[in-house]
């Protein structure tokens, strides 16, 4: 049975081939890439080229001025249906012949489109056809101009308006319009020769002429009727309308809209229908181009918005490594505007895409992590860079913290270990006074260790925003006077003066946190004025704040460090850390405690020397 089927199929194929070979009309088939697949003997006789010279190539028979017409026809056939039109084709000897061409889609057994089939009939002996061809040639020339103008438009609305105007111009219709197909509805979006009040009018697709055309499977349709009797609601109100011609335009292989040519004063023939069909094909191309352009514009705008909103610096480089785009974050990070850097290399080294990130320090002191990626299909590179200064400084601060903490811990631990070892090994040989002195030294050093550990714990809580304060009204004046009394005996080299007015109002805050703050400020004042001098703690009520100041006559603060000293693991005199000791957490804790109370602390230099630390707290509500 299978052999009989194969034999029968072969017979059918042989017969079909014999028909093509024996046909009196020229038959030309070409693939979707426009290369010739079939060129029968009649085509050889008609055009002069043997099949061997044209197979696999683009057909040489289409005059250059008719290429746009050919493209529009193929686009219409691709969307479905068959077209018959009168045109001209070139022969090998250079002559042009007048033809009527029936063109249809070439499809495989599975329905896949393989190309197109042209059946060419000579039409040169018909005087009417000659006149029609002459007329058509003039129209085609005009069509070429119209199509070029239409395709030059990039705005979708402008393309739609140009389609309506071109439709009326080429088909000599009394009016024309273009309707969009949207969710089972038609909407009039462009028109020419029609009242402006019709724009935006809609109708049901199912009951419209467009719906009827789509159900018929045809590509063009003409409907006639008495004035005002059309069921198509969009046009039913037009006076004197007797003929409607319409054709579909496709975008992405789907019906997108329809062109209407409306006639109320002249007869309509097949020439007008062919022109309408050609216009629909060209409109499909123009609409596809305009929509693709709008999508590109939208995509570009979206990409631009994403790039501009990015917190990372982003730069796009051309093939020469010069900057084409530079987002606002890049300006903020580098201090260089887009105008200043466009057309120039980046102000930092750029790693190769395969090399991972590169860390670089800018002249302004900022550290950047720089990444580079290539854009697929485009000779461009995208540079992404972010500010890692805080992380870099924290890393350096941690290293310094470890070194400093090790140093600060080593001394008391060594002392405690030494005295404990002495007591253990020489207890009986030591006098009672010596044993008491050793134990006292161990106690003192253990206290220092406890305070150091407490400061470390307090600093870690401050860094994690876990400082616990209980804010409320308290007697700030009494607290300051008590702190001054407690600190006076701690240094014989310093004179501690207090200027606390009796009229100082209660403050709003946490008394324990405030006591820690003032104690740390006084301790720093003693530490950083090694030559002694006067340390003054004062307070005053100034407007919305109570200000507490601690002033000394010491080494002062280096220019540019007045804010930096409040960071973790930083001291005002980092180059002389061994001289003053400490791990650089005191002022960091002071600021965090002040802010936890709704206050603030700041530092300034005194003339001719010394430092002024200023704590601000809110007065308690009365």
Image (spheres, helix red, strand yellow):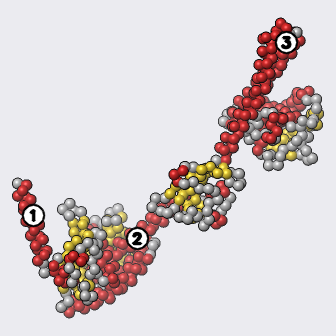
Q: Looking at the picture, does residue 19 appear above or below residue 428?
A: below
Graded by Cα atoms within 10 Å as few (under 14), some (14 to 19) or many (20 or more), the crowding at tag 1 reads: few
Specify which label sits upstream in the sequence, 2 or 1.
1
Viewer-side residue, 577 vs 127: 577
User: Does any portion of residue 55 appear in the rendered image?
Assistant: yes
Residue 132 rendering spot, x and y as whole percentages: 25, 89
Which quadrant would residue 218 be assigned to in this image? bottom left
Q: Residue at label 1?
A: 10
Please state, as top left, top right, bottom left or bottom right, where the C terminus lies in the image: top right
| Kind of element beneath mark 3 | helix
* Circle on res. 435: 3
Residue 223 rendering spot, x and y as whole percentages: 25, 77
Viewer-side residue, 93 vs 340: 93
Residue 133 shown left or right of residue 198 in the figure: left
Residue 391 rendering spot, x and y as whole percentages: 65, 43
Residue 614 shown left or right of residue 207 in the figure: right
Specify which label sits upstream in the sequence, 1 or 3.
1
Graded by Cα atoms within 10 Å as few (under 14), some (14 to 19) or many (20 or more), the crowding at tag 3 reads: some
Q: How far apart are marks 3 and 2 (CA)?
A: 98 Å
Callout 2–callout 1 Cβ contact below 8 Å: no
Q: Residue at label 2?
A: 289
| Kind of element beneath mark 2 | helix
Q: Looking at the picture, does residue 572 appear above or below residue 298?
A: above
Q: Which residue is drawn at 35% across and 67% down?
A: 251
Residue 486 rendering spot, x and y as whole percentages: 88, 27
Which quadrant would residue 28 be assigned to in this image? bottom left
Please state, as top left, top right, bottom left or bottom right, where the N terminus lies in the image: bottom left
Q: Residue at x 20, y 77 (%)?
A: 51
Graded by Cα atoms within 10 Å as few (under 14), some (14 to 19) or many (20 or more), the crowding at tag 2 reads: many
């Amino acid at each position: 049975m299978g052999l009989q089927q194969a034999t029968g199929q072969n017979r059918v194929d042989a017969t079909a081939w014999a028909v093509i070979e024996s046909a009196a009309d020229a038959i030309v088939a070409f693939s979707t890439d426009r290369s010739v697949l079939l060129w029968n003997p009649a085509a050889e006789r008609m055009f002069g080229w043997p099949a061997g010279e044209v197979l696999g190539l683009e057909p040489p028979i289409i005059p250059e001025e008719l290429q746009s017409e050919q493209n529009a026809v193929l686009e219409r056939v691709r969307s479905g249906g068959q077209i018959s039109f009168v045109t001209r084709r070139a022969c090998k000897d250079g002559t042009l012949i007048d033809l009527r061409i029936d063109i249809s889609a070439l499809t495989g057994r599975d329905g896949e489109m393989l190309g197109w089939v042209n059946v060419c009939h000579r039409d040169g002996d018909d005087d009417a056809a000659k006149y029609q061809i002459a007329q058509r040639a003039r129209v085609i020339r005009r069509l070429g101009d119209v199509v070029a103008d239409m395709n030059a438009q990039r705005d979708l609305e402008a393309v739609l308006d140009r389609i309506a105007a071109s439709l009326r111009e080429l088909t000599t219709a009394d009016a024309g319009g273009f309707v969009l197909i949207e969710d089972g509805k038609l909407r009039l979006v462009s028109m020419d020769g029609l009242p402006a009040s019709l724009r935006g009018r809609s109708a049901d697709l199912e009951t419209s002429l467009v719906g009827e055309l789509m159900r018929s499977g045809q590509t063009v349709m003409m409907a006639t009727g008495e004035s005002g009797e059309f069921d198509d609601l969009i046009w039913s109100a037009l006076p004197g309308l007797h003929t409607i011609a319409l054709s579909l335009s496709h975008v992405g292989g789907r019906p997108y809209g329809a062109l209407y040519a409306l006639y109320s004063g002249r007869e309509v023939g097949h020439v007008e229908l062919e022109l309408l069909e050609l216009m629909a094909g060209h409109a499909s191309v123009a609409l596809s181009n305009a929509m693709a352009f709008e999508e590109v514009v939208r995509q570009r705008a979206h990409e631009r918005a994403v790039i501009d909103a990015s917190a990372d610096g982003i730069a796009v480089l051309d093939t020469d490594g010069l900057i084409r785009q530079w987002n606002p974050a890049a300006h903020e990070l580098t201090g260089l505007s887009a105008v200043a850097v466009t057309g120039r290399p980046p102000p930092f080294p750029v790693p190769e895409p395969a090399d991972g990130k590169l860390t670089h320090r800018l002249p302004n002191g900022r550290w950047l992590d720089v990444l580079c990626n290539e854009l697929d299909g485009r000779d461009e590179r995208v540079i992404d860079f972010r500010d890692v200064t805080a992380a870099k400084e924290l890393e350096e601060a941690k290293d310094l913290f470890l070194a400093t903490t090790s140093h600060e811990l080593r001394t008391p631990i060594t002392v405690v270990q030494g005295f404990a070892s002495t007591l253990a090994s020489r207890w009986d040989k030591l006098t009672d006074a010596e044993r008491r002195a050793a134990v006292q030294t161990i106690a003192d050093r253990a206290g220092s260790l406890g305070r150091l550990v407490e400061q470390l714990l307090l600093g870690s809580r401050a860094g994690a925003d876990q400082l616990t304060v209980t804010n409320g009204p308290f007697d700030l004046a009494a607290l300051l006077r008590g702190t001054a009394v407690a600190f006076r005996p701690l240094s014989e080299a310093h004179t501690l003066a207090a200027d606390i007015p009796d009229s100082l109002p209660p403050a709003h805050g946490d008394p324990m946190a405030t006591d820690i703050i003032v104690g740390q400020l006084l301790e720093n004042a003693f530490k950083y004025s090694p030559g002694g001098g006067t340390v003054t703690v004062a307070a005053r009520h100034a407007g919305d704040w109570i200000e507490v100041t601690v002033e000394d006559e010491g080494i002062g603060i280096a220019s540019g460090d007045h804010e930096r000293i409040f960071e973790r693991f930083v001291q005002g005199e980092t180059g002389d850390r061994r001289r003053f000791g400490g791990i650089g957490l005191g002022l960091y804790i002071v600021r965090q405690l002040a802010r936890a109370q709704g206050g603030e602390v700041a530092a300034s230099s005194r003339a001719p020397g010394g430092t002024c630390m200023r704590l601000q707290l809110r007065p308690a509500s009365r």
